[in-house]
Image: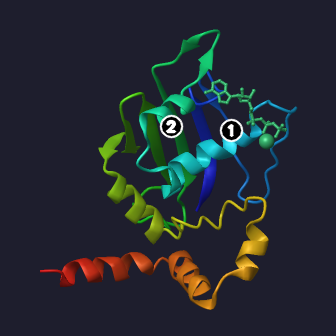
Amino acid sequence: MYIKKVIIEGFKSYKEEVSTEIFSPKVNVVVGANGSGKSNFFHAIRFVLSDLFQNLRAEDRHALLHEGAGHQVVSAFVEIVFDNSDNRIPIDKEEVRLRRTVALKKDEYFLDGRHVSKTEVMNLLESAGFSRSNPYYVVQQGKISSLTLMKDSERLDLLKEIGGTRVYEERRRESLKI
Ligand code: ATP
Ligand code: MG
Protein backbone atom coordinates (compact mmCIF):
# COMPACT_ATOMS: atom_id res chain seq x y z
CA MET A 1 0.00 0.00 0.00
CA TYR A 2 1.29 3.46 -0.78
CA ILE A 3 0.04 6.96 -1.45
CA LYS A 4 -0.72 7.16 -5.14
CA LYS A 5 -2.04 10.68 -5.34
CA VAL A 6 -2.97 13.67 -3.18
CA ILE A 7 -5.70 16.16 -4.05
CA ILE A 8 -5.96 19.42 -2.13
CA GLU A 9 -8.39 22.31 -2.29
CA GLY A 10 -8.64 25.38 -0.09
CA PHE A 11 -6.07 24.10 2.39
CA LYS A 12 -3.51 26.68 3.61
CA SER A 13 -1.68 28.05 0.56
CA TYR A 14 -3.63 25.80 -1.87
CA LYS A 15 -6.66 27.76 -3.07
CA GLU A 16 -7.78 25.99 -6.24
CA GLU A 17 -8.01 22.24 -6.44
CA VAL A 18 -4.62 20.74 -7.17
CA SER A 19 -3.71 17.14 -7.71
CA THR A 20 -0.31 15.55 -7.71
CA GLU A 21 0.78 13.32 -10.50
CA ILE A 22 0.63 9.61 -9.78
CA PHE A 23 3.38 8.84 -7.29
CA SER A 24 5.90 6.11 -7.70
CA PRO A 25 5.74 3.36 -5.06
CA LYS A 26 9.44 4.02 -4.56
CA VAL A 27 10.98 7.44 -4.15
CA ASN A 28 9.24 10.71 -4.95
CA VAL A 29 10.75 14.13 -4.53
CA VAL A 30 8.90 17.35 -3.81
CA VAL A 31 10.76 20.46 -4.90
CA GLY A 32 9.76 24.10 -4.97
CA ALA A 33 10.88 27.63 -4.15
CA ASN A 34 10.78 28.93 -0.59
CA GLY A 35 7.21 29.55 0.47
CA SER A 36 5.76 27.58 -2.42
CA GLY A 37 3.88 25.13 -0.20
CA LYS A 38 6.12 22.09 0.36
CA SER A 39 5.64 22.06 4.12
CA ASN A 40 1.93 22.76 3.67
CA PHE A 41 1.74 19.75 1.38
CA PHE A 42 3.17 17.45 4.05
CA HIS A 43 0.97 19.10 6.64
CA ALA A 44 -1.99 18.25 4.40
CA ILE A 45 -0.99 14.58 4.37
CA ARG A 46 -0.60 14.49 8.14
CA PHE A 47 -3.93 16.31 8.48
CA VAL A 48 -5.60 13.25 6.95
CA LEU A 49 -3.49 10.47 8.43
CA SER A 50 -2.39 11.54 11.85
CA ASP A 51 -4.45 11.89 14.97
CA LEU A 52 -2.28 14.79 16.05
CA PHE A 53 -4.72 17.14 14.41
CA GLN A 54 -7.86 15.99 16.19
CA ASN A 55 -10.15 18.05 18.39
CA LEU A 56 -9.43 21.16 16.37
CA ARG A 57 -10.53 24.45 17.84
CA ALA A 58 -12.23 27.09 15.72
CA GLU A 59 -9.00 29.05 15.38
CA ASP A 60 -7.10 25.93 14.27
CA ARG A 61 -9.65 25.34 11.52
CA HIS A 62 -9.48 29.00 10.61
CA ALA A 63 -5.71 28.77 10.13
CA LEU A 64 -6.11 25.78 7.80
CA LEU A 65 -8.56 27.50 5.46
CA HIS A 66 -6.94 29.35 2.59
CA GLU A 67 -6.99 33.10 2.97
CA GLY A 68 -5.93 35.48 0.24
CA ALA A 69 -6.60 39.17 -0.43
CA GLY A 70 -8.77 39.42 2.69
CA HIS A 71 -11.01 36.61 1.54
CA GLN A 72 -11.18 33.22 3.20
CA VAL A 73 -12.53 30.06 1.62
CA VAL A 74 -15.43 28.47 3.50
CA SER A 75 -14.19 24.91 3.26
CA ALA A 76 -11.20 22.85 2.29
CA PHE A 77 -10.34 19.24 1.74
CA VAL A 78 -7.39 16.95 1.41
CA GLU A 79 -7.89 13.61 -0.29
CA ILE A 80 -5.36 10.82 -0.26
CA VAL A 81 -5.66 8.13 -2.89
CA PHE A 82 -4.02 4.91 -1.77
CA ASP A 83 -2.85 2.16 -4.01
CA ASN A 84 -4.28 -0.81 -2.13
CA SER A 85 -3.37 -3.61 -4.54
CA ASP A 86 -1.78 -5.49 -1.63
CA ASN A 87 -5.03 -5.15 0.39
CA ARG A 88 -3.14 -3.81 3.36
CA ILE A 89 -6.17 -1.61 3.98
CA PRO A 90 -8.84 -4.20 4.78
CA ILE A 91 -11.13 -3.09 1.95
CA ASP A 92 -11.41 -5.24 -1.12
CA LYS A 93 -10.44 -2.55 -3.60
CA GLU A 94 -7.31 -1.73 -5.57
CA GLU A 95 -7.71 1.96 -4.82
CA VAL A 96 -9.04 3.57 -1.64
CA ARG A 97 -9.77 7.27 -1.22
CA LEU A 98 -9.70 8.95 2.15
CA ARG A 99 -10.79 12.56 2.34
CA ARG A 100 -10.91 14.93 5.27
CA THR A 101 -12.84 18.12 4.91
CA VAL A 102 -12.62 21.19 7.08
CA ALA A 103 -14.88 24.20 7.44
CA LEU A 104 -15.01 26.87 10.13
CA LYS A 105 -17.45 24.89 12.26
CA LYS A 106 -16.57 21.25 11.59
CA ASP A 107 -14.26 18.75 10.01
CA GLU A 108 -15.25 15.34 8.67
CA TYR A 109 -13.90 12.19 7.02
CA PHE A 110 -15.08 10.41 3.89
CA LEU A 111 -13.95 6.96 2.84
CA ASP A 112 -14.58 6.35 -0.86
CA GLY A 113 -17.21 9.07 -0.67
CA ARG A 114 -18.99 7.62 2.36
CA HIS A 115 -19.15 9.72 5.51
CA VAL A 116 -17.25 7.90 8.28
CA SER A 117 -16.40 8.62 11.89
CA LYS A 118 -12.97 9.63 13.06
CA THR A 119 -12.75 6.44 15.14
CA GLU A 120 -13.50 4.30 12.09
CA VAL A 121 -10.75 6.08 10.14
CA MET A 122 -8.18 5.80 12.90
CA ASN A 123 -8.89 2.10 13.44
CA LEU A 124 -8.71 1.41 9.73
CA LEU A 125 -5.44 3.27 9.36
CA GLU A 126 -3.96 1.59 12.35
CA SER A 127 -4.81 -1.90 11.19
CA ALA A 128 -3.23 -0.97 7.85
CA GLY A 129 -0.01 -0.21 9.73
CA PHE A 130 -0.20 3.56 10.08
CA SER A 131 0.76 4.45 13.60
CA ARG A 132 -1.33 7.25 14.99
CA SER A 133 0.29 9.28 17.67
CA ASN A 134 3.83 8.81 16.54
CA PRO A 135 3.65 8.74 12.77
CA TYR A 136 6.91 7.05 11.82
CA TYR A 137 6.04 7.32 8.14
CA VAL A 138 6.49 11.08 8.28
CA VAL A 139 9.96 11.61 9.62
CA GLN A 140 10.17 15.19 10.66
CA GLN A 141 13.32 17.03 11.62
CA GLY A 142 14.55 15.79 14.99
CA LYS A 143 12.56 12.54 14.83
CA ILE A 144 15.55 10.29 14.26
CA SER A 145 17.24 11.43 17.45
CA SER A 146 13.98 11.12 19.39
CA LEU A 147 13.71 7.48 18.23
CA THR A 148 17.15 6.71 19.55
CA LEU A 149 16.45 8.49 22.84
CA MET A 150 13.09 6.78 23.50
CA LYS A 151 12.60 4.47 26.44
CA ASP A 152 12.42 0.77 25.53
CA SER A 153 8.74 0.67 26.50
CA GLU A 154 8.01 3.56 24.15
CA ARG A 155 9.82 1.83 21.32
CA LEU A 156 7.80 -1.31 22.03
CA ASP A 157 4.57 0.72 21.84
CA LEU A 158 5.71 2.11 18.51
CA LEU A 159 6.46 -1.39 17.19
CA LYS A 160 2.98 -2.52 18.28
CA GLU A 161 1.49 0.37 16.38
CA ILE A 162 3.54 -0.30 13.28
CA GLY A 163 2.66 -3.99 13.45
CA GLY A 164 -1.00 -2.99 13.63
CA THR A 165 -1.66 -4.93 16.83
CA ARG A 166 -2.32 -2.10 19.26
CA VAL A 167 -5.77 -1.57 17.82
CA TYR A 168 -6.69 -5.13 18.90
CA GLU A 169 -5.40 -4.54 22.41
CA GLU A 170 -7.63 -1.49 22.61
CA ARG A 171 -10.63 -3.40 21.30
CA ARG A 172 -9.95 -6.17 23.81
CA ARG A 173 -9.83 -3.62 26.63
CA GLU A 174 -13.09 -2.11 25.38
CA SER A 175 -14.76 -5.54 25.22
CA LEU A 176 -13.76 -6.30 28.80
CA LYS A 177 -15.46 -3.17 30.05
CA ILE A 178 -18.84 -3.77 31.60
P1 ATP B 1 10.38 26.64 2.58
O1 ATP B 1 11.18 26.19 1.41
O2 ATP B 1 10.74 28.02 3.01
O3 ATP B 1 10.33 25.64 3.71
P2 ATP B 1 7.70 25.78 1.80
O4 ATP B 1 7.66 25.38 0.36
O5 ATP B 1 7.77 24.69 2.80
O6 ATP B 1 8.86 26.84 2.02
P3 ATP B 1 5.25 26.45 3.07
O7 ATP B 1 5.73 26.67 4.46
O8 ATP B 1 4.54 25.18 2.80
O9 ATP B 1 6.44 26.67 2.05
O10 ATP B 1 4.28 27.63 2.61
C1 ATP B 1 4.34 28.84 3.26
C2 ATP B 1 3.30 29.76 2.66
O11 ATP B 1 1.98 29.27 2.92
C3 ATP B 1 3.42 31.12 3.31
O12 ATP B 1 3.52 32.06 2.27
C4 ATP B 1 2.14 31.26 4.06
O13 ATP B 1 1.66 32.57 4.05
C5 ATP B 1 1.20 30.38 3.26
N1 ATP B 1 0.03 29.99 4.06
C6 ATP B 1 -0.03 29.27 5.19
N2 ATP B 1 -1.29 29.18 5.64
C7 ATP B 1 -2.06 29.84 4.75
C8 ATP B 1 -3.45 30.12 4.65
N3 ATP B 1 -4.31 29.69 5.57
N4 ATP B 1 -3.88 30.84 3.60
C9 ATP B 1 -3.03 31.27 2.66
N5 ATP B 1 -1.70 31.07 2.69
C10 ATP B 1 -1.22 30.36 3.73
MG1 MG C 1 9.09 24.25 4.38
Q: CA distance from mark 1 to mark 2?
A: 14 Å
How many numbered dots are placed on residues in this image? 2
Colouring of the image: rainbow
| Beta carbon of the mark 1 residue lies under 8 A of ligand 1 | yes
Quadrant (top left/top right/bottom left/bottom right) for the N terminus: bottom right
Q: Amino acid at mark 1?
A: Asn
Measured along the vertical axis of the image, is residue 129 above or below residue 141?
below
Identify the residue position indicated by label 2 in the image: 60
**What residue appears at the point 32 percent right and 42 percent down from the top-left corner?**
114
**What residue appears at the point 62 percent right and 52 percent down from the top-left corner?**
3
On screen, residue 81 versus residue 25, left or right, reads left
On screen, residue 47 versus residue 173, left or right, reads right
Q: Amino acid at mark 2?
A: Asp
Position of residue 142 measured from the top left corner of the image (x, y, whole percent): 78, 64
- Residue 9 visible, this angle: yes
- Answer with the quarter of the image where residue 20 lies: top right
172 and 142: which one is in front?
142
Q: Which mark is residue 55?
A: none
Quadrant (top left/top right/bottom left/bottom right) for the C terminus: bottom left
- Answer with the quarter of the image where residue 169 lies: bottom left
On screen, residue 86 versus residue 101, left or right, reads right
148 and 86: which one is in front?
148
Identify the residue position indicated by label 1 in the image: 40
